[in-house]
């Protein structure tokens, strides 16, 4: 069995069993100290020829962005969902990830018969799901969702960098790098930092910034993220 057969194996079996709309689901941004967690759901037509064979983290940024647009061209539907840092602090990162995934599924133009996730169980789908460890390496749909989620989140963090350049989000995308920790300690906690995360809680400067440079409410922030996705798709 070659790589093309392996990456589409689970989808092919589901299509043969009568499942027409199989959605692969993955996320980006569970580990960062700042910014949203972004999830994507991708539904491909049955019989599609695989065109992704690597985990999104092992693909160059240029290739990943090229695949991002190719996924939107070849998929039956692509849905993207977000959970903001405020929601992450309120319900924890695992539940926020599941929330973002459910929002991504809701954003699809078709209702999935079955879902394949990267080892995350979504209660509403019951037995109609397959939770694969390293799903983005074993399922074409999951691999595609991983790429869409990562490219979208990176773009959002680059946009947030323009609002809070003192944290250099465009470089580390909110992940806990040495530079990010140093800038967090120097500048204090921004409105986009996850205040429930240990490295943020340890920060000595807890004065919440009062500038109106970034939306305050969760609803406004989710709208902001959706607008950035549209900017990305337009090539802005």
Image (cartoon, helix red, strand yellow):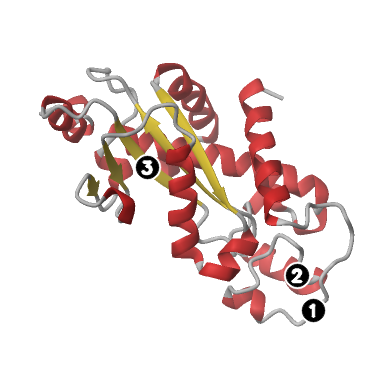
Residue ranking furthest to the right: 211
Can residue 120 be seen in this snapshot? no
Q: Which residue is mark 1?
A: 205
> Could you tell whether 128 is left or right of 169 in the image?
left
Q: Who's the residue at 73% across and 48% down the image? A: 220
> Could you tell whether 222 is left or right of 116 in the image?
right
Q: CA distance from mark 3 to mark 2?
A: 31 Å
> Could you tell whether 76 is left or right of 86 in the image?
left
Q: Are marks 1 and 2 in contact (CB under 8 Å)?
A: yes
Nearest the camera: 98 or 157? 98
Q: Who's the residue at 22% across and 17% down the image? A: 47
Q: Nearer the viewer, mark 1 or mark 3?
A: 3
From the image, which quarter does the C terminus lie in? top right
Residue 190, numbered label: none
For marks 3 and 2 on the same chain, the one whose residue lies earlier in the sequence: 3
For marks 1 and 2 on the same chain, the one whose residue lies earlier in the sequence: 2
Q: Which residue is mark 2?
A: 189
Q: Which residue is mark 3?
A: 25
Q: Nearer the viewer, mark 3 or mark 2?
A: 3
Counting from the top left corner in percent of width and height, residue 65 is at 53, 29
Q: Is residue 207 placed above or below 13 in the rendered structure?
A: below
Q: Secondary structure at mark 1?
A: loop
Can residue 72 be seen in this snapshot? yes
Counting from the top left corner in percent of width and height, residue 131 is at 25, 51
Counting from the top left corner in percent of width and height, residue 11 is at 21, 31
Counting from the top left corner in percent of width and height, residue 203 is at 71, 79
Q: Secondary structure at mark 3?
A: strand
Q: Secondary structure at mark 2?
A: loop
Location of residue 4 (image quadrant): top left
Q: Are marks 3 and 2 in contact (CB under 8 Å)?
A: no
Q: Who's the residue at 65% across and 74% down the image? A: 200
């Amino acid at each position: 069995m070659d790589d093309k057969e392996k990456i589409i194996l689970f989808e092919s079996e589901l299509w043969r069993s009568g499942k027409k709309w199989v959605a692969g689901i993955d996320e980006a941004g569970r580990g960062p100290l700042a910014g949203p967690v972004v999830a994507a759901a991708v539904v491909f037509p049955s019989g599609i020829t695989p065109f992704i064979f690597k985990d999104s983290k092992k693909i160059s940024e240029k290739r990943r962005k090229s695949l991002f647009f190719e996924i939107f061209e070849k998929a039956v539907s692509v849905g993207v969902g977000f959970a903001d840092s405020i929601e992450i602090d309120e319900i924890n990162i695992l539940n926020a990830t599941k929330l973002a995934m459910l929002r991504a599924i809701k954003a699809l133009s078709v209702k999935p018969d079955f879902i394949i996730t990267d080892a995350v169980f979504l209660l509403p789908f019951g037995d109609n799901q397959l939770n694969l460890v390293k799903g983005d390496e074993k399922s074409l749909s999951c691999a595609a969702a991983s790429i869409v989620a990562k490219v979208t989140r990176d773009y959002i963090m680059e946009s947030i960098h323009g609002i809070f350049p003192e944290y250099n989000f465009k470089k580390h995308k909110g992940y806990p790098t040495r530079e990010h920790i140093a800038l967090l300690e120097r500048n204090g906690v921004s409105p986009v930092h996850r205040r429930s995360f240990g490295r943020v809680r340890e920060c000595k400067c807890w004065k919440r910034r009062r500038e109106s440079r970034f939306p305050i409410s969760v609803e406004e922030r989710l709208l902001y993220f959706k607008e950035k996705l549209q900017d990305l798709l337009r090539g802005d």
